[in-house]
Image: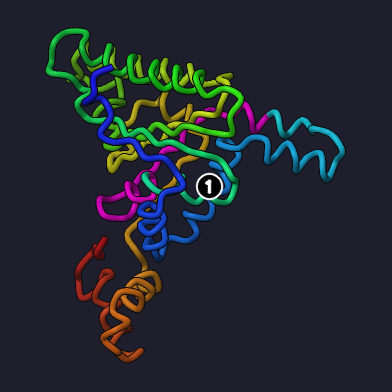
Amino acid sequence: MNSDTFENTITFPDPVAQERYLALVGIDHIKERVAREASIILNPSSIEEWSKKFYKEEISLIKLFKNRPPLFIFSGDVGTGKTTLAETFGDQIARSEGVKITLYKLSLNARGSGIVGEMTKLISDSFEYIRNEARSQANSKTALVLFIDEADALAQSREAVQMHHEDKAGVNAVIRGIDSLNDLPVPVMVIMCTNRHSAIDPAVHRRSAVTFEFGRPSKDQCQILLKTYLDDLNLSENQINQLASMCVPYDGLTYGYT
């Protein structure tokens, strides 16, 4: 495995990740849902225990959740918190579920240098590395996350007329890789971030258990952000309200700040 394949690796719990996670304000509704949905994948024993506690057996619904594709897509504008949440949500789950979680961030070097077959091999090798890591940690309370930022660069729709054969082969490798993560000794999931949701290949979309939409903040969310980060300036409620009003579409401006 080329050392440049993964930009970095983070093992949770991690104090720096926790600080970055807590600093994400104004998107609590997304953070809470990501934590709930990801916990089911990264700690499947939790829903098994829930079922046995309330129904004395593992009900059929549990199997449905356990068989969902281990893929989440984070979609939205640049600057809306996608990447930071993708890089840090594992810390919240590691702490709440008592699971050691390791995140591998796939480098865009996985696109290769343009040599025929290189990108496909790099992507395939990346998924193989993750599978081997999962097998090597069998019988331990651990889970793995593969994070692919700017996912449209690797999983662009194969329906694009101008798409090169090598790119199509790379998308096929991504799809095969996602499909290969089921039935491993420890849970593995994939997080894809994109600000071009429509560019992602339909077959990848179909494999997404959940797609989270990150929008530009509303006025209420801007007020939360401003109160949090300008607290030591002792601004009045009216001043905060005025600033928040200028962070969203106003006076003919059709878009707000990220």
Q: Position of residue 219 (x, y in %)?
A: 35, 73
Give the residues drawn in magenta, as a range: 64-86
Which residue is drawn at the image coordinates 26% and 86% (left, top)?
233
Q: Amino acid type of disc 1?
A: Ile
Is any part of residue 168 visible from this angle? Answer: no
User: Residue 240's quadrant in the figure?
Assistant: bottom left
Residue 252, magenta (yes or no): no
In the image, 3: left or right of 222? left
In the image, 143: left or right of 170? right
Which residue is drawn at the image coordinates 32% and 34% (left, top)?
105
| Foreground of the two, 238 or 198 | 238
Q: Position of residue 173 (x, y in %)?
A: 35, 15
Q: Position of residue 222 (x, y in %)?
A: 34, 71
User: Residue 158's quadrant in the figure?
Assistant: top left
Q: Secondary structure at mark 1?
A: helix
In the image, 74: left or right of 253? right
- Residue most toward the right? 56
Residue 70, magenta (yes or no): yes
